[in-house]
Image (tube, rainbow, N blue to C red):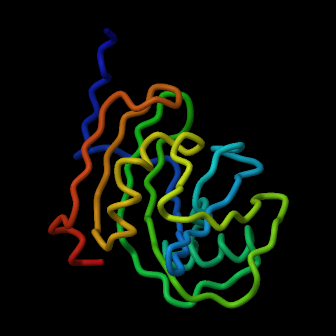
Amino acid sequence: MSMVREVDWENWDAEMPATLLFVIQGDQILLIEKQRGIGAGKINGPGGKIDPGETPLQCAVREVQEELHITVKDPIKMGELFFDMSTMPNIYCHVFIGTEFEGTPTATDEAIPRWTKISEIPFDQMWEDDQHWLRDMIAGKRFIGKFIFEDEKIEWMDVQFNPAESQAW
């Protein structure tokens, strides 16, 4: 059994601030087949790296516009993810959910849109952490998740739902 590396979460720093924005309509969630970058080949929500001077909310809306050619009208922050990664930059991700948008989800060179029944989310094709928070977020729970990854496998995790810090969002 391997030892999980120690992470000082109090002083932890992310090389990559990022966002995810999941669109929900009825019993469907809008996922993407990621075409390039970190997670290429996986199913995920649209999102990406926060640009300098950009807020997480601005980034989430921009990334969905770039990846799917839609504009989400009502994004709400639901969670934060902290990923300590062994083989790629550490990621601090703000997670949003929305229900209303303008435009038609359109494939781009970054992402192929994929409406999926919430009951049929393909967790086996997604990052391993998603199965530990995505359903609860869809059900309306805010969350903070911390994960230590070795390559693409979770070595350690701590997920808290409806944490006190989320009241400031």
Q: Nearer the viewer, residue 117 or 80?
A: 117
Seen as rendered, the residue at the extreme top is 1
Q: Taking 154 as reference, is 141 above or below it?
A: below
**3 relative position to 68: left or right:** left
**160 relative position to 74: left or right:** left
Residue drawn at point x = 52 percent, y = 27 percent: 151
Quadrant of the frame with the N terminus? top left
Q: Taking 73 as reference, is 13 above or below it?
A: above
Residue 3 x/y as whole percent: 30, 15
Seen as rendered, the residue at the extreme left is 164
Residue 67 x/y as whole percent: 73, 67
Q: Quadrant of residue 168?
A: bottom left
**114 relative position to 45: left or right:** right
Q: Nearer the viewer, residue 46 or 115?
A: 115
Q: Taking 2 as reference, is 85 above or below it?
A: below
Residue drawn at point x = 53 percent, y = 55 percent: 121
